[in-house]
Amino acid sequence: MICLDDFEKYARDNLPRSVFNFVSCGADDQQTLHDNRNAFKRIRIRPRVLRDVSKRDLSATILGQHVPFPFGISPSGLQKLVCSDGETATARAASSVGVIMILSSYSNSSIEEVANAAPTAHLWFQVYIFKDREITAELVHRAERAGYKAIVVTVDTPYVGNKIDDNRYGGFNPQVRLPNLESSCLLPLCDSLELSASVTWSDIRWIQSLSNLPVIVKGIMSGECAREAMAAGVDGIMVSNHGGRQLDGVPASIDVLPEVIAETQGTNVEVYLDGGVRLGTDVLKALALGAKTVFIGRPIWWGLTYKGEKGVRQVLDILRDELSLAMALSGCASVKDVSSSMLVRCPTSNL
């Protein structure tokens, strides 16, 4: 395995098509899914030369936590579909290199199991706001008791997006255990619990009232929504289109990042990004545009498919090494040296 794309190829060749489609496909025509990656190619790096890059510091501070690299793991559930250890394997791999892992509400391993499996890990917990608000409240309380360091609220899912390829080829609705949502109960994947379609910013303030943990909103795709998030008092914003799995035809995450950064500049609100990150140069470009850190989702699934915990660790190691080399070749000895002046937009016709 040389790069992250190799893990995806392995997963495509070795997983049942229904499982692979469940993870890999995007909504409708998958325009946004593909553009998440293509958008990074429209941004070019202008290296700075004759800089001392013999030693490089990749570390960052995220919500007061020191991390050795400015990338982490996005929430993605049902990981036992590809690895018997599921999310506990991912947590151990994340802990071994010191990066943040965001655990999904829809994980096959419970909040407590993951915390116990990786007691030194930097763990955040992702929640949806369900019609039954008590379910959401209990999840937040459990995460705080188990030592998680932040709550990530996914805000782009009043309904689940339409995934044509998944529906056409999968017929995929397994009976899976979702211990965070109903202990020791088998629940159908698609109709397990109803998400609330009436969520407003007042619900974010309600989430904040449930614990002392920082609250991040995931799914912000405009400067307007960034202003509303700041008005609600959030601690962090994740620029994300849900990996192209919700509304198709929205911009790539990296294309929206600059306007969100412009709105948050001069505040204490941290901005993160996920969507389409596959290379160390992608991480570098996101940092240059102002992201504090980036998160990756699907490559973690592919790593789990390949060799479980070891495969996830390999994915993280490859991305770290690629970022380190990209920094050296662009003249950056530290992530603090990375800036937007290093970037230039490439005309689409030249791609």
Image (cartoon, rainbow, N blue to C red):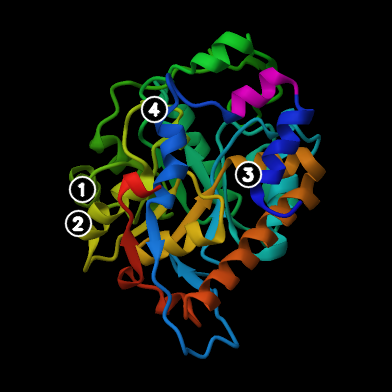
Name the element at disc 4. Answer: loop
The three-letter code of the residue at mark 3 reads Pro
Q: Residue 339: x, y in percent?
A: 35, 72
- Distance from disc 2 to disc 1, alpha carbons, whole Å, reads 6 Å
**At 55% across and 74% down in the image, what residue appears?**
58
Give the residue number, with chain letter if any, for mark 2.
263
Of residues 42 and 138, which is closer to you in this image? 42
Q: Mark 4 or mark 3: which comes first in sequence?
A: 4
Residue 267: image x %, image y %?
A: 23, 65
- Check disc 4 and give the amino acid type: Thr
Marks 1/3: CA distance?
28 Å
Circle 3 residue: 299
Task: Describe the element under mark 2 as helix, strand or loop.
Answer: helix
**What x and y, as percent, mark residue 244?**
44, 32
Decide if residue 262 is on the left or right side of residue 63.
Answer: left
Separation (CA) of disc 2 from disc 4: 23 Å
Residue on which the image places disc 1: 223
Tell me the residue at 47%/75% (across/down).
330
Mark before the other along the chain sequence, 2 or 4:
4
Residue drawn at (50%, 41%) of the image: 126
> Left or right: where does residue 302 sit relative to residue 337?
right
Circles 3 and 2 in contact, beta carbons < 8 Å: no
Q: Give the foreground label among 2 and 4.
A: 2
Identify the residue position indicated by label 4 in the image: 157
